[in-house]
Structures are given as C-alpha cells and as structure tokens.
Image (cartoon, rainbow, N blue to C red):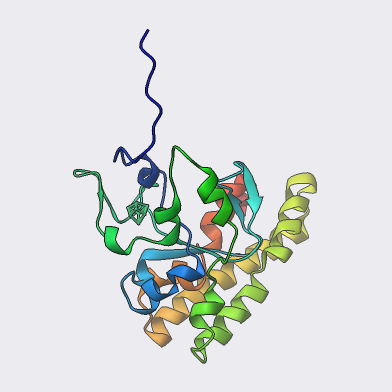
Amino acid sequence: MEQEREQTGCRRCGKCCEKGGPAFHTEDRFLIETGVIPLKYLFTIRKGEPAHDNVKGGIVQARSDIIKIKGKKGAWSCIFFEKKTKSCTIYADRPHECRTFECWNPKNLEIIYEKNRLTRKDLLSGIKGLWELVQDHSRRCSFKIINPLLEDIRKNRTPESLEKIRFIISYDDQIRKLTVKKAKMDPDMLDFVFGIPLSEILFKLDKTLLLL
Ligand code: SF4
C-alpha cells in the first residue's frame, strides 16, 4: 500500500479554524485597539474558569483571562472562517496563534500557547468607570468563590451553597442588563467585558443547578 506523504505545509482543509478561534496574545493587541477585530466578536474565559486546554487536552482552570474569537452561532467554527471557500476573512490580519499554528508541527503552538496572554486589563484598564465595574464583577463572581461552592453542591447538595450560587448568577445577570440599559453598551460586547454569562457556564458544568 502506498504510504501517505508526510505533510509539510497547509493544505487549506480548514479543520483548525472549524475547531474554534484563537486566543489572543499581547502581539495581537493592535488588532483590537485599531478596530480590525471588533470587541463584539470576542469573548473572555475568566481566571479560574474551567476551559479546554488546546495543547495538553482536558479541562483545566484558566490561569488568567483568555480572550478568544467567538464561534459562529451554535458551532465552534471561528466567526471569521468562510466555509464555502475554506478561507479566513481576516487572513492578512489573523492573530498570532493562527500565524504560528501548523497542524503538521504542533510544537510551535505549544511554545507560545501560555505566553503573553492578552487580558481585559490590557485593553480596559484605561477606561475609567468600565474597568472598575469589570473588577467589581470579577470579585463578586470570582471562580475562586464559585468553584468550591460547586464542589460542595456536587458532593453534599448543601442548600446554603445552592443559595449562594443562585445569588451570584443573579448578580451576573443583573449587571449585564444594567450595563446595556444605563451605559448603552452593545449587548454583543458583554461576553468580552464580563465573560460568558454564568447561567450558561454553570448549567453546562452542573445540571444540578437546573433545580434552582
Ligand atoms: S482568525 Fe482566520 S485563521 Fe484564525 S481561526 Fe479564525 S478563520 Fe482561522
């Protein structure tokens, strides 16, 4: 049987883009600050949030903010991936991870994967008022508080822990609504500013919470 030739370059199959968009590094900061990639196309995985490790595999707690490009509705596929032509609509301005990743040589991505992650602090700390709001939300809805509560609910179904989680989810929901109403923020930016709604994350993680 004829052996498949070893891959040494991109075949433009699009599989990597269909698996999801990249995470941002400080090298990509200008793409966001110049508006090449608008904030409404991004989401944040917050510190401590359970997330898939694309290099080691498995679910781990994020060590810092991870800012990523959103997927298309109901799919993982990067929002900038054009399925018909198997192409990237921002190819000339694609982020650092996309430039570095070679599916035939994953070592390159492994080297940069955890380095110089771009965070919300890098992008928002200069915006007075908004940054304080983000920090306050991070404190009240911290995964440092949430993760032990979830553990307790899983093991013991403690009513007090359920009540505390319910309160945190409600706060997270209210602050998003208020920010849209009072600060007139585009609702599509909320997943970047405050991360994915806790109601979505937590119900996916633990169906027990559906009983709340
Ligand atoms: S930004 Fe472009 S190259 Fe990167 S994952 Fe999205 S479609 Fe693919």
User: In the figure, 83 relative to 115: above or below?
Assistant: above
- Which residue is at the far top? 1
Viewer-proximal residue among 117 and 170: 117
Name the residue at 44% across, 37% down.
104
Viewport quadrant of the N terminus: top left
User: In the figure, 120 relative to 165: above or below?
Assistant: below
Viewer-proximal residue among 58 and 112: 112
Based on the displayed image, in which of its 4 quarters is residue 32 positioned?
bottom left
- Which residue is at the far left? 84
Viewer-proximal residue among 4 and 49: 4
User: In the figure, 22 relative to 126: above or below?
Assistant: above
Viewer-proximal residue among 151 and 63: 63
Look at the image and tell me whether residue 75 can be seen: no
Q: Is residue 103 left or right of residue 56?
A: left
Q: Is residue 61 left or right of residue 113?
A: right
Viewport quadrant of the C terminus: bottom right
Q: Tell me residue 15's x, y (percent).
A: 36, 39
Q: Tell me residue 82's x, y (percent).
A: 24, 49
Q: Tell me residue 103's x, y (percent).
A: 44, 40
Q: Is residue 174 left or right of residue 34?
A: right
Q: Tell me residue 83's x, y (percent).
A: 24, 44
User: In the figure, 138 relative to 201: above or below?
Assistant: below
Name the residue at 34% across, 69% down.
37
The mark total stands at 0
Look at the image and tell me whether residue 123 can be seen: yes
